[in-house]
Image (spheres, rainbow, N blue to C red):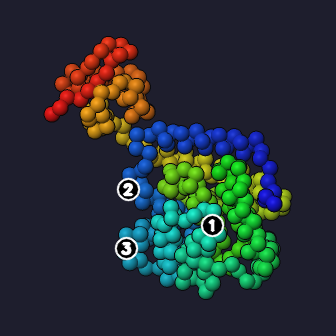
Amino acid sequence: MNPPFTITPLILRRVSQIERLIGRIEGLEHPKPQPHLRKTNRVRTVHGSLAIEGNTLDLNQITALMDGKRVLGPQEEIREVLNAIQTYDDLAAFDPLQSKSLLKAHKQMMQGLIPNAGKWRLKNVGILKGSAVSHIAPQADRVPYLMDDLFAFLANDDLHPLIRSSVFHYELEFIHPFQDGNGRIGRFWQSVLLYHYHPAFEFIPIESLIKDHQQDYYQALEKSDHDGDSTHFVEFALEMIHRALEDFLQNFSPKPLTAEERLNRAAQEFSKQTFSRKDYLALFKTISTATASRDLKHGVESGLLQKQGEKAQTAYEFRKS
């Protein structure tokens, strides 16, 4: 049986907005960010997810640990960061549809922090908010069956991956399958699911944005608990994904290529063949027809290109050096 939730107009609108932003990323000349931005975003991801759990190491300390430098701080918090860095570095290697892969990720994330890392919990648990119990998780003996059902939902449901990953995130927190580390592994596994939906998500620090809206995050979990379905949490999670993508595009701002740089790249692509303006536009999806025409005219005038034919029959070929 699938987890209970309702696809609302807000959820559909968020999915549409996110897909448009992904289209903009795909339209970038170099959609994969440069190494320094990838590193900065990975630091923000690790910091965001662990800060939610009370880790006090700051961005500079996490950057130093990522660089292999020594850092002064509580040893348990340093271990948390090192574990998370390694786990996120391996993000692409985890199979999002296999519970064994989730257990492996939890073991890696919690190694040296708890004695039963990578194993389903064997005790019943309640989640405290202050001194009051805010959520009583399902009994421990039901955890393996509930997680099997949850992974069956992932494998067999034809929902949009953005919705499915958000439902999974909530349901994992509700089941609370591990004695500790449920929050960080739930956020991590949604990142794994999103990466397999689109590889750009490997470098988008959604966890950092959730940390900035930590109270809203907990309220979304509590409201879905109260409602008995994940609808409200899915709406919240999609909003975080949408904002994270907007921030990513704003900070990315890749330097546009010059006409010479585009022609040099085209020379590598079409080195021994003729090509049309349409072929040139297919190679550089973000430029206009007028820009392509100017590039090709410049290539002819500079002696880099030979032009053949007229109008619709025009073709170009790079001169042999």
Where's the N terminus, which quadrant?
bottom right
User: Most extreme residue toward the right, as rendered?
Assistant: 227
Q: Secondary structure at mark 1?
A: loop
Q: Earlier in the sequence, mark 1 or mark 3?
A: 3
Q: Is residue 249 visible?
A: yes
Dot 1 alpha-carbon crowd within 10 angstroms: few under 14, some 14 to 19, many 20 or more: some
Q: Secondary structure at mark 3?
A: loop
Q: Earlier in the sequence, mark 1 or mark 2?
A: 2
Marks 1, 2: nearer the viewer: 1
User: Most extreme residue toward the bottom, as rendered?
Assistant: 115
User: Most extreme residue toward the front, as rendered?
Assistant: 273
User: Most extreme residue toward the left, as rendered?
Assistant: 321
Three-letter amino acid code at the position of disc 1? Gln
Three-letter amino acid code at the position of disc 2? Pro
Q: Which residue is mark 2?
A: 35
In which quadrant of the rendered view does residue 220 lie?
Answer: bottom right
Where's the C terminus, which quadrant?
top left
Q: Residue at x 67, y 48 (%)?
A: 160
Q: Position of residue 276 (x, y in %)?
A: 35, 24
Dot 2 alpha-carbon crowd within 10 angstroms: few under 14, some 14 to 19, many 20 or more: few
Q: Position of residue 316 (x, y in %)?
A: 29, 24
284 and 312: which is toward the camera: 312
Q: Which residue is mark 1?
A: 98
